[in-house]
């Protein structure tokens, strides 16, 4: 199965060299998955998600998207113009699902983020239309704050490394075939309190741990999932973040539970493939049910 990407997609050749099925957008009957990419290194982030999507066993058309009210400074404008669409209600309505990435703004108050007003309009549209959405890291905290009034809290020190997360709700389809515990990369200065989630009847706490707090929360009625950590990360991503932190702070902590004999060790990729595969399977199942329903009343699917 293939991931179909826009022409000029930066990682197409790299992913194809890994024997992954990558092709340009066309008229293929694929699931349309939006990627609202809020990360500064957009090419690395889009590569990570294209890779994990290519391993889900579904044909997927990846639709990179960006905010209109924010001008990225770490990616050339010409590339953004060629590859990215501006997020809009009309574009969102064409999608089977949407991933919203993290962003390096977690230590700012939400309202101080320069695209916050536009972002909340996107959140409201997603909720009204019950768009299947997976929020990652900062966007998960932002969505819980805007939609449910759950505040983020600054941790005593940065949660940075690979941490075991306990599956608290084994009935969730997102953690199918996970077992009791799974490892995931964590890289953040903030968290939310588990009790704030547990007191909400419309939210479900699916996974987490004492060291880093909730890892996965869902809002089934809104078709939204909130993953605070990074199962999409590549093997060297935490190491690259560590080197970046060291350039500004020579005392920056090394990522925990990550290095083996001085080299980065990836022991989360299997669960990453399962997690994104489980999420995509849910979208595929919904599309099938929708097509059957339309056909049953004589509407062309």
Image (cartoon, grey):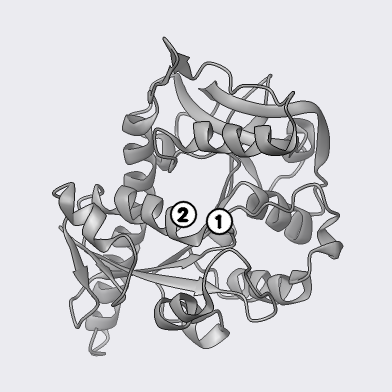
- Please name the residue that numbered disc 1 is placed on: 101
Whole-percent x, y for residue 21 in the image: 16, 57
Residue at (79%, 64%) from the top-left corner? 113
Q: Does residue 139 sit above or below 201 in this rendering?
A: below
What residue sits 78% from the left and 32% below the top?
195
| Residue at horizontal 31 percent and vertical 31 percent from the top | 270
State the residue in front, 275 or 154.
Answer: 154
Numbered disc total: 2
Task: Check disc 2 and report the residue beneath it.
Answer: 45
Residue 46 visible, this angle:
yes
Left or right: 142, with 230 as reference point: right
Work out which quarter of the rendered image holds the N terminus and state it.
bottom left
Q: Is residue 83 left or right of residue 144?
A: left
Count neighbours of disc 1 (C-alpha within 10 A) and say few if under 14, some if 14 to 19, many if 20 or more: many
Q: Position of residue 152 (x, y in %)?
A: 80, 43
Based on the displayed image, in which of its 4 quarters is residue 4 positioned? Answer: bottom left
């Amino acid at each position: 199965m293939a991931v179909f990407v826009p022409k000029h997609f930066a990682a197409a050749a790299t992913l194809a060299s890994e024997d992954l099925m990558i092709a340009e957008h066309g008229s293929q009957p694929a699931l349309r998955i939006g990627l609202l990419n809020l990360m500064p290194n957009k090419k690395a982030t889009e590569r990570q998600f294209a890779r994990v999507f290519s391993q889900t066993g579904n044909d997927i058309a990846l639709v990179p998207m960006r905010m209109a009210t924010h001008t990225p400074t770490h990616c050339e404008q010409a590339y953004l113009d060629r590859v990215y669409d501006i997020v809009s209600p009309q574009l969102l309505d064409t999608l089977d699902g949407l991933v919203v990435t993290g962003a390096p703004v977690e230590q700012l108050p939400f309202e101080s983020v320069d695209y916050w007003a536009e972002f909340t309009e996107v959140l409201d549209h997603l909720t009204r239309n019950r768009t299947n959405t997976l929020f990652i890291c900062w966007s998960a905290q932002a969505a819980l704050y805007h939609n449910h009034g759950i505040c983020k809290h600054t941790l005593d020190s940065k949660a940075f490394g690979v941490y075991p997360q306990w599956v608290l709700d084994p009935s969730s389809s997102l953690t199918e075939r996970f077992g009791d515990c799974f490892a995931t990369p964590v890289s953040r200065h903030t968290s939310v309190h588990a009790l704030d989630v547990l007191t909400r009847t419309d939210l479900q706490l699916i996974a987490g741990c004492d060291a880093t707090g909730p890892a996965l929360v869902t809002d089934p009625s809104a078709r939204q999932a909130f993953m605070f950590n990074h199962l999409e990360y590549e093997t060297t991503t935490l190491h690259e973040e560590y080197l970046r932190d060291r350039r500004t702070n020579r005392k920056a902590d090394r990522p925990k539970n990550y290095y083996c004999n001085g080299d980065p060790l990836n022991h989360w990729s299997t669960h990453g493939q399962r997690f994104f595969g489980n999420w995509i399977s849910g979208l595929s199942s919904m599309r099938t049910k929708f097509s059957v329903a339309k056909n049953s009343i004589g509407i062309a699917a």
